[in-house]
Image (tube, rainbow, N blue to C red):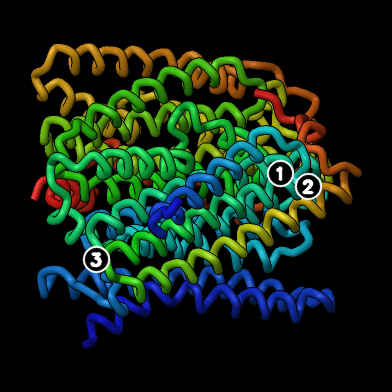
Amino acid sequence: MTSNFLFSSLLLLPFLAAPIVYMLGRSTARNGNVLGISLTRALTVFFLLVEGCLLYLVVKQALSSGGTYLLIGDEPLVFDGIGLILACVVLFLGLMVTLFSIDYMSNEKGEEKFYALLLATIGSIIGLGMSYDLFNLWLWFEAMAISTYLLVAFYNDEPPSLEAGVKYLVQSAVGSALVMFGIAMMFSQTGSTTLTDLWQMTSSEAPLAKIAGVLLIVGFGVKTALVPLHTWLPDAHSQAPSGISAMLSGVVIEAGLVAMLRAISMFGKVDFNWGAILIGFGCLNILVGNLMALRQTQVKRLLAYSSLAHVGYMLLGFGFGMAFGRFEGAAGGFFHLLTHSMMKGLAFLAAGSLLFTLHLSKQEHVPLTLDDLNGASRKYPVAAFALGLAVLGLGGIPPMAGFMSKWQVLVAGVKAENTLMLIVVIFAALNSILSLGYYAPLVNRMYRHEPSTAVEQGNKMPGLMIIPLVILSIAIVVIGIWPSSVQFLTEQAGLSLLYTFFY
Amino acid sequence: MNLPIPLVVLITILCLAGIGLYCLLITRNLIKVVIALQLIVKGAVLAFILAGNMTGQLNLAQSMALTVIVADTIVAVVGLALAVQIRLKTGSLDIKSLSSLKR
């Protein structure tokens, strides 16, 4: 029973930690107790480290016993490759975001809520990756959504933040209602919501299964930001606190994607080309994301639109995996998920550190515009270097991790040996060059322009803020030079996905 | 006219979802938006019960319906809390007045 104990504590710990952190911060912050609020921050970091150790122990157990399997009531939770990669990504990025936010959020009221909600978000994403039951999947998804609604509207005195929060809430809630209708449809056909049962019981000629599949794709697609459903994303990403923008872009939309893949994987028998749908949405996402990013004047909105394009690359990878059974495609999709979370996380954190020093630390709630970045490298060399590294990596310049993951996705497309797929691959590669059209000017502005007035009047950057930037920059370069260091994660995840889809 | 009960429930589900979606499209008041969301989800709750009835798994269906109600109430609470803040900060509940973020 030890494996079950370890596994359940892995899932439960963030939800036990969140109220503890909140109550501790709440009871001390009211008296203006500085020690109490620092204890709250330290406790959050401590819980995340404990969670990481638990994850390591569960992995060790799973390797020695060949897969852990846990039942809570009738709802199975399985620890497999997909859950592992999502848990690793969210814990690593969550820890970086927490370290970053210690200074970033220190001027805000209600800081303890921020940490408690961040822990709850991390916990629900870990659970989402491991749930193997359609209803359970929806429940984790909804828990993640509710905690992020509150985080997006965290600056609850600013009308733009509230507007972004309302847009996000309404669109997500409609999406999750569609998911519910899809689940009810499948439930009425089979009398079970376990993914394995559903896979076995759906026949290839089930019309209702196709409708349910489309409902699930559209419902989860709202959170994944498939193109016609993406309008909440730039608002939410640009208005949330920067740490939360990094979480939203780095893991929350990917968690929606993983939920969608889990849901589709039970339709493996249905006679319908699900991979083609993913590839189609992928192309649309890449094109619209890049074109919209080209015309942005605010840094965080630009990065938000580039998230659309990168979700497109992941969709292409998974589409190649599902449509042609290309194992490299699915593994490449997960590899891009991992590298994108690091690069986009770093880009948002670096932009956030500049936003903090230029505006927020002076109590000005204004967006960071492209013009503000001019000459930032003179005064803030580390932040400018990190932002430059991140955006060049996102654009796919070789020594960074982004090149490796894009390459793997596109190679899988070429190996599919299909003329149409070859056109898709060329289209995606050309779009990667188009994306440099907005990434490269950022670097140019920071390094070659004369400093803007905002930079000249900016405050000093806090030392603790620099640590996560440096760690993430090193991680990006290391993965880019030595991609096999994360191969065990991505290959396991790709195998798990294709295994559940085809067998 | 003597309709079978599952058919009546099915029609009710479709009506609830349809009215909810229509209301969501035409309304401009934030509170009414939250009510529209509730209508759609109530349709989904009925759909779970109907599905359970069709497959003879009523216990499972009822527990799912209860869970959905709880999760959805939290969403409604968050939505109404945002509505209160928006009313306090902008003095209006009209969603058309919330359009500072463009493109």
**Mark 3 chain:** A
In terms of depth relative to the viewer, which is nearer, A411 or A380? Answer: A411
The spot of residue A115 in percent (x, y) is 61, 65
Select label 2 or label 3 by which is in front. Answer: 3
Give the residue displayed 34% in from the left and 65% down from the top. Answer: B52
Tags 3 and 1 on a common chain: yes
> Which of pointers 3 and 1 lies earlier in the amino acid sequence?
3
**Residue A117 placement: quadrant:** bottom right
Name the quadrant of the C terminus of chain B.
Answer: top right
Q: Whole-percent x and y of residue A154?
A: 70, 53
Residue A476 shown left or right of residue A98 in the figure: left
Can residue A460 be seen in the rendering of this structure? no
Query: What kind of residue is marked 2?
Result: Ser
Q: Amino acid at mark 1?
A: Phe
Q: Which is nearer the eye, A311 or B82?
A: B82
Q: What count of labels does the image hold?
A: 3
Question: Which residue is identified by label 2?
Answer: A361
Determine which of the numbered discs, if any, sits on residue A170 in the image: none
